[in-house]
Image: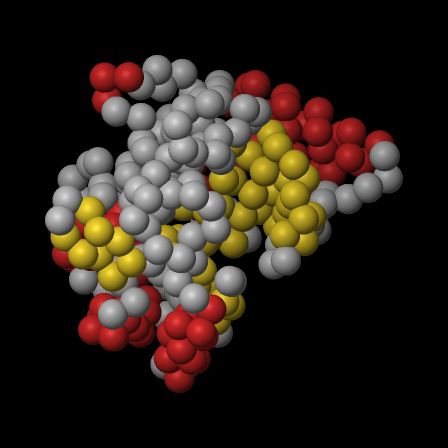
Amino acid sequence: MIGFLFEQVVFGPIKSRRLGISLGLNLLPENEKHCTFNCLYCECGWTTPKNKRCLSFPPRDIIKSELEKRLKAISDKGSFIDAITYAGNGEPTIHPEFTGIMNDTVELRDSYFPDAKIVVLSNGTMTGNEDIRNALLKADINQLKLDAGTEETFQKLNNPIIKITLNEIIENYKKFNGNFTVQTLFTKANFKNKTIDNTHPDEVQAWLEKLKILKPNLVIIYPIAREAPLSEVEKIPPEVLQEIGKKVEEAGFEVEIYN
Ligand code: SF4
């Protein structure tokens, strides 16, 4: 099976160009991908189908003790971390105890590495829930997915397994008042005899219009990095990403481009 999955709740630390030394938190079941999306390019592979889900999320107390154990070990060695990043085998905010886990993370970060940033990589589908949104606002960096400016491309590329529209996502993102980062993966693909291309000028323009509404503090754009579940998914060349990045800057936003 194609897909890169984490086997532990706490992983790393990983050195990241943007976040520095980052300790990862995987709130999803080990070795199984769970998400509200089923993106055609997902490096974790396809979302586990309903009839095969075990959904045994690691409990909050285990996550807290695993995180504390690791933070203490790093601190005892005289090392440090720059960030604690929620990532892992799917969408972290679907964990039923997400709000409590965020409180624990803030508490542990404050006691071991008060300067470290708490970062959440999320597809944003749960941001309509006020409790989840308030928990996310306790993080220092919310990196929220926005891969499309049109409903059609959103549905095809992110392939949600719940009923949700791009407009709902945009309305929920507005509630962050610009206090978040947009992350966008650019790609082209063929799926079920349909072409998907969020690099098409019309698509880029529609996406830029959404950015203008949302006013994020940063826009991160990148291509696929690992093998995707769908073999037709294309890696977009750096020069195309540079062109898109230029348009983001011209629209007045800070942009980081990863190749
Ligand atoms: S939102 Fe992220 S984890 Fe979920 S399917 Fe898309 S790429 Fe994978």
Task: Give 182 or 242, whichever is nearer the viewer.
Answer: 242
Direction from residue 220 to residue 148 in the image, left or right: left
Q: Is residue 95 above or below residue 130?
A: above
Color style of the picture: secondary structure
Residue displayed at 43% across by 43% down? 227
Q: Nearer the viewer, residue 188 or 198?
A: 188
Please state the horizontal and vertical placement of residue 170, each as a whole percent of the image. 25, 58
Asked if residue 250 shows in the view, the reply is: yes
The residue lying at 47 percent from left, 46 percent from top is: 226
Q: Does 170 appear above or below 116?
A: below
| Identity of the residue drawn at 27% across and 63% down | 198
- Kindly indicate the quadrant of the structure image that contains residue 28: top left
Percent across and percent down for residue 99 are 44, 34
Residue 5's x, y, as percent? 48, 30
Q: Which image quarter is the N terminus in?
A: top left
Q: Quick check: can you spot residue 181?
A: no
